[in-house]
Amino acid sequence: MKSILLTSFLLLSYLFPTTLLAQQTVKINGTVMDGKQTLPAATVLLYTAKDSSLVTTAMTDQDGKFNFTAAPSKYYIVSSSIGYNKVKSAPFQLSGPAALQIPAITLKENTKNLSEVSIVAAKPVLERRADKLIFNVDATPSAAGLTALEVLKKAPGISVDHNENISLSGKSNVLVTIDGKQTYLSSTEVVNLLKSMQSNQIETIEIINNPGSKYDANSTGGIINIKTKKSQTEGFNGNLALGAGFNKYLLPNGSLNLNYRKKYFNVFGSYGYYKNKSLQRLNIDRITPGTDPLSFTQRNKDTSAYSSQNFKIGTDFFLSPKHTIGFLVKGNISDYNQQSLSIVNIGKSFAATDSILKTPSYNSSNRKNFSYNINYKGVLDTAGQEITVDADYSTFDGTNDANYTNRFYQPNGSFFKDGQIYRNFAPSNIDIKAIKADYTLPINKIFKLEAGAKMASVKSDNNYVYENDIQGNWIFDNTKSNRFLYDEKVSAAYATLYVNLGKTSLSGGLRAENTNSTGNSITTNLVTKRKYTDLFPSLSLSRNIDADNTLNFSYSRKINRPNYQNLNPFVFFLDQYTYNQGNPNLKPEYSNNLEASYLFKQKYSLALNYSRTSDVITQVLLQNEVKKSMYQTILNLASEEVVSLTFAFPVKINKWWNMNNNVLGYFKQIKAPDLNGADLNSKQFSGNFYAQNNFTLTKLISADAALRFSTPQIEGAFKVKSMYNADAGIRYSFPNKTGNLKLGVSDIFHSQKARIFSTLPGNIYNLEQYGNTTSVRLTFTYRFGKMTVKSARSRSTGLDEEQKRLGGK
């Protein structure tokens, strides 16, 4: 594997040799304003003065700033923004070597009626930056009416498996953040949150394969940042979205966003509702290990109904042009009900059934998650020195109640005997507190320093009450019941130094994190304490060969701490032979990550990644020889190595048809000596292909179609067979630009079927899982109020990492 990695790096060096670095490039900095304040999200185009050819494009950040890198020559700039007239700058000479600061570009508000304004530019589906890939959701009509989890499946490089585990470029344990902040939720609760979030609430999805020291270290698999829509208008405005889908059941959804902004304050709020009903089938064929094997043929049918409500309300007070304080409250309330029927044929072979186990069950849960944030941002001088402070408090309350009735029947269908009849109640309460501060200090034109600190505290109380039906009476079972308390405190500090050497820029950072945790299984009197301090270095190097060619290299070390619920030893049943169990002995995993990439014309990218993870936290399916049962649990495997090569390339077929393509190939090796009595050494070459087609049919009608194909892949101790999926959508925009209609179809060929088998010697099973994933959705969106773009503050909180870990599957 090391030889593969070395060869690949040498190949990159050969393809893009240092002799290309001879051409000098110079940086251009500027600001776009409206006469009063800076303008974010304004479009800026750089043209050569000689022949007016387009060199490159940019978009202003939240402070209205932009920058280009170009070869010495004479240029001019054209800037535009919705609600403003287009402005062309005076020609200027770029000579270098020092960066050129051009005068501020001032746009004037367009006084015409909005219906008379022609919007000729649109965001592409994918934008490629040196350190991230940006997926623009609004540019994808087929995303209409989807949940955030379903939208993730459309983003290149991201995979969501049959158990709703999210992976990025073949690596699991991905950190999902919302608006740059950790959710502090477990993987299960993150998935539930993503299911409750609608696509019309999402602006972009940022994919960061190798984050630096500024980010929390708990991201061994990279970061997926979901940026929600924020109003950037002054006065009163809003956005209403109503939708309905059909997948055999009716699926209503809707959302409302409101914003009111004046000179000294901004008030905003949103509300969303989502309802889903689905049918899932799970088929498992397995042979128990040992000298007396049994064959189990299991067929499970689940009908589940899910509804959620989420809201957000906040305000910003502009104390002065340089100081802002804000308050934010967010909430999510969801309910889940599931009716299941499991039928298991048991015998000496699959062809000879001795008995049949039937288990009807009912499961219900509700969750309430509320977050509160106070945020301050201060710009301390004109050079860019600034400080931000976030204080957060979050609560999570949930229940999970279930009833199971196990009954055995003869092969001819006649009743034989009762098996286990039981029920459980599992309330959960989690409190999270965090405070963090970030400081930016531009030292001079070459050096910039970023530093920060964070403290987070998490306390969880999980109770699991298990009762057996004994002759019609419910009797408490203290052998399975348990109360689990978890207390964790994490303190962190980081510093990153950025160095700008013209066409070469580099950064080096170091993050220190101290963890102090106690897991207390009260019923079993098992206390697990851990206290450790780790250092997480990061390094990034970028070389702008010229305006079209950029080389990047990065390194980082990361940690992944166990989810709170994964440490919980509770047992959750499907039937008396199939269950899920936590593991209080889980250790954190550590990974080292390398990435080398090449970017051409800000469109085409080639990235080589290598990661090695020790004590890999992963989900496994194992069998118990004595109990004849199959169970799912979380274990630490010895190591996982992944080498991946990603090639992303857009193709313009003609003026109305554009394609975005992403090809990922990777090699993964997983090792685990003595796993359930056997040695695991699993290797697999895998690949993913993603193609997004966008069609501009008329000025008002656009469409898209996407195809994703994945070859066989390995995860933990099992292998997933190949799979493909196709989606399509069409959008009609109203002539006055105040709204649109979107029609989307998901899983056109009903091909989303997970087929899994074991890679562990002696652990024989085949699993198949599928549902009514083919759906049609219609969404109506209407914008109202003043549409003039003004600057708005980008807001985020400090609770993302801890909420990511509230629980596990």
Image (cartoon, rainbow, N blue to C red):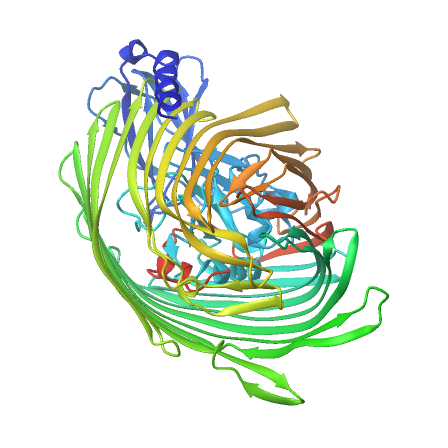
Q: Residue at x 43, y 54 (%)?
A: 635
- Residue 681 is situated, as x and y percent measured from the top left of the image, at 46, 37
Q: Residue at x 18, y 47 (%)?
A: 385
Q: Examine the rendered structure and indicate whether residue 136 appears above or below residue 520.
A: above
Relative to 710, 103 lies left or right: left
Observer-nearest of 22 and 63: 22
| Image quarter of the N terminus | top left
Q: Tell me, yes or no, if residue 661 can be seen here.
A: yes
Q: Is residue 454 left or right of residue 203?
A: left
Q: Is 668 displayed left or right of 308 in the figure?
A: left
For the point 23% across and 35% down, which residue is it? 507
The quarter of the picture where residue 186 lies is bottom left
Residue at (37% x, 24% y) in the render: 5
Task: Where is residue 654? Give x, y as percent.
Answer: 65, 22
Q: Does 257 sit above or below residue 652?
A: below
Q: Say which of 303 and 589 sits in front.
A: 589
Residue 270 position (above or below residue 399)? above
- Snapshot quadrant of residue 596: top left
Q: In front: 410, or 146?
A: 410
Q: Is any atom of residue 796 visible in this view?
A: no
Which residue is most to the left?
443
